[in-house]
Each structure stands twice: as C-alpha cells, then as structure tokens.
Amino acid sequence: MLDVLAHRVYRHLFFAQVIALIGTGLTTVALALLAHHLAEGQAGVVLGTALAIKMVAYVGIAPLVGAYASRLPRRTLLVSLDVLRAAVVCTLPFVTEVWQIYVLIFLLNACSAGFTPVFQATIPDILEDEEQYTRALSLSRLAYDLENLLSPMAAAALLMVMGFDVLFVLNALAFFISAALVISVTLPAPLALEDVPGVWRRVTHGTRIYLKTPRLRGLLALSLAVSAAGAMQIVNTVVLVRSVLGLGEKEVALAFAAAGGGSMLVALLLPKVLDRVSERPVMLLGGVMMALSLYLGWLGPSFAGLVGLWLLLGAGASLVMTPTGRLLKRSCQPEDRPALFAAQFSLSHSCWLVTYPLAGWLGVNLGLKGTFALLGTVALAATALTALIWHRRDPMIVEHEHIPISHTHRHYHDEHHQHEHEGWEGPEPHRHFHHHSPGSHRHVFVIDNHHTRWPS
C-alpha cells in the first residue's frame, strides 16, 4: 500500500491531509474544554449545537464550492482554504461568549466543506491507475482512523505541559504546514466544466448526476446505514460504558479505539480484495455487518462484547466508505468530479445530520436496547434498499438509445459529434449550435450533457 507514496505529488498531498487531520483532532479536544470553560454544566449542549452547525455547513457549503471549483486553480483554492482555516482557529483562544464559538465553528467547517471535496476530486486526476487509486483510498481511510486514535492521546500529553488554548495554535500551524505542502507541488488543472444555465442548476449539477446514477443512489442508502451505526457508536458509547456498565474513562477510550481498529484492519486488507471482487458485494457485506452489530447490541453485551461489536461495526463501515471514491470516479466525466465529490460530501453528511440527534433522542426516550434495535433496522433497511436499486449487473459499457436533440456547447469531434462545419467554428474544442440524430450505440455510460437519464 505504501508504494503509492513513491508518487511525489500524491505523497505531498497525503502528508498535507495527515497533518491537517492531526491538527483538527487537537482542536476537537480543545473545543470540548473551551465549551466547559464558558458553559460548565451546559458544555454538552454547546458541543451538540456546534456539531449540528458543523453538519449544516458541510451540507450547505460543499455543493456551492463544487459548482464553481472548476473555474479556479486547484492549488490556489486549496491553499487559500487552508490559510482561512488557520486564521479561524487562531481566533478561538480569544472567544468569550458561546455564540462566538458557533460563528467560528460554522466558518471553520465551511472552509473544510470546500477543501475536502476538491482535495478528494484531485487525487484520481493524479493517480489515474485504478490499482494505485484504490491503495490511496485505503491509505486515506487509515489516516482518518489513526487520527481518531492518536489525536486524543497526543492532546492529553500536550495538556500536561500547556493550556488548552495552545492546541488551537498548534492546529493553525498544522493548517499552514498543509498549505505549504500543497504549494510545493504542481496540481493538474481542473477540466473546464461546460457552463450550466442558472445558479441553481449549477449548484445542483453534481447532485443531479448523483441521484440519476443507480450505483450512487445505492451508495447514498449505504451512507445512511453508516451514519446510523456510527451515530450509535459515537453518541452512546460513553453512556453504555459509564452509566450501564459502570466503568471508567479508560474503558470509554478503549471502546472508541475498537471501532477505529476494525476500520483500520479492513483498510489494510481491502486493496487486495478489490483486485478480485467488485465493490457492490463488498459494500453490501459492510452494511450487513453494521446492522448485525447493532442488533447484537440489543442483547446487552458485557464490555468485552461491546468491544467486539464496535470492532465489527468499524470493519463494516470501512467496507462501505473505503471504495466510495472508486464509484464516484467511474460515475462521471473527469470535468464533473469536483461537483460529484461535493455532492457525495453533502448528501452523506445530511444523513449524519439526521442520525446524530436521532441516536441521542432515542437513547434518552426509548432506552439503549430500543435504540440499538431501531438503528439496526435503519441500517438493515438501507442495505436492502441498496441491493434493490444498485443492480447486480452493473456494466460500465451500456447499450443505449439517443433521442434527437439540438443544442450549443463546447465539444470535440468524438463519437457523439460527427457533423458538418462551415469553417468559422475554429479549432477543437469549439462551441456552436449542432444537432444530434437519434441512434443506438455502446460505450462507457455516465450521466452528462448527452446522457441525461439512465437507460432502463
């Protein structure tokens, strides 16, 4: 897996991602302490509200950035967003009111909602080989899981010698280092996206491609399964360990680490599996594993049993999330990648926006056993829905009919553009009004200007 780091551009981007993740992990701990400093007994309410604001920023801002990312130089955009994130984090130590936390958290995550999809959409343009790209996805999954495991420990060690406000400064430094690593390489220019009439149509361009593609509709259903399982684990682990089992903070950390360990194990093994098996059965297995882990939680497991369930849950989540980039890459034209990755970022986080409060509310009002059963049913139903809408036969090359159409857009003379010219049109790619006759043919099929609906 580490062989992919021999690619200099990817190596710099990967370490930029890792360093930014570590800094963000430090801020997560520091933010909890800041909330307690300002609100004391209401710190949980403050953090819950901040988490909801984070998700709102992710859902609302990502499509806006994805709509216009192709018009901006990638390196300039990524560096600017890193610098903006550093500036926002630097102001957190000076916060004196709770509302200021909410404003800064929105700004910070609005920048992240722009940075992350553009970053993710750049990787397949750098690593065009499918095998290399798969290993890069697994490496990225490992980075996220390691951050979840190591950042709290690093924060605890640092807090022994410094105040929590210094953690914000270290995060800002991490963002500046990330920006420097991005500056140090040349990124491929984004392919020009054909002008889409109207702001709303441009903002929803990636979402329309996403929702018209059966395999991606299946991915959205599986994203709901991931969020249902993940919300149960993140929101209610501390309640299960401290209140139900009567154990301490060390056991809480170990339970969280179990989910990360299961995810990391799958990320290490998955590239070899995906060399032999398609994504659909792997991802469906992940959905079943998450549902099973939640249903088993209804039995009221001991601490050892809970660790085993969270290990199973983390492994299932990784089976779903790690191959996601491969599905997105094959489901659009290269110029549509920023918009499609932004759509995935927004739609998947909208699932978390529903399941986070649901897991907390159900835990209080229905009890933990009922919450396990209900969220397990959500995960299982979402997985079953995926099996229905993402057909087992999912070929890349599809025979399809073209209806007659006349329109104007920038184009090359490819298989869809065989027409006469008058001489004034200029070199390719050029733009002029032209007509497409009806017909039937076969090629790699994705939703785009010439294919606006999936063939039945």
Image (cartoon, helix red, strand yellow):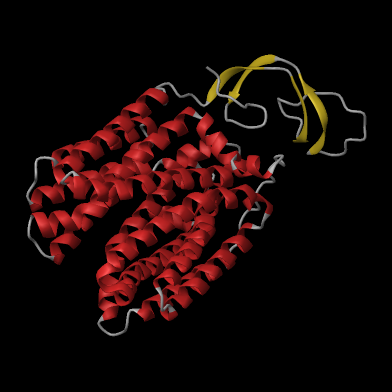
Judge whether residue 278 can be spotted in this image: no
Residue 378 located left or right of residue 221: left
307 shown above or below 224: below
Tell me residue 264's x, y (percent): 29, 52
Q: Which residue is drawn at 25% across and 54% down?
A: 235
Q: Quadrant of residue 72?
A: bottom right
Q: In which quarter of the image is residue 26?
A: bottom left
Judge whether residue 142 can be spotted in this image: yes
User: How many badges with numbers are in the image?
Assistant: 0
Tell me residue 278's x, y (percent): 39, 31
45 shown above or below 373: below
Q: Which residue is drawn at 45% across and 61% down?
A: 17
Residue 224 located left or right of residue 88: left
Tell me residue 138's x, y (percent): 38, 49
Camera-side residue of 114 and 97: 97
Q: Which residue is drawn at 59% across and 30% down?
A: 447
Q: Which residue is drawn at 9% across and 51% down?
A: 304
| Residue situated furthest right in the rendering | 423
Camera-side residue of 7 and 36: 36
Camera-side residue of 244 and 303: 244
Tell me residue 290's x, y (percent): 25, 39
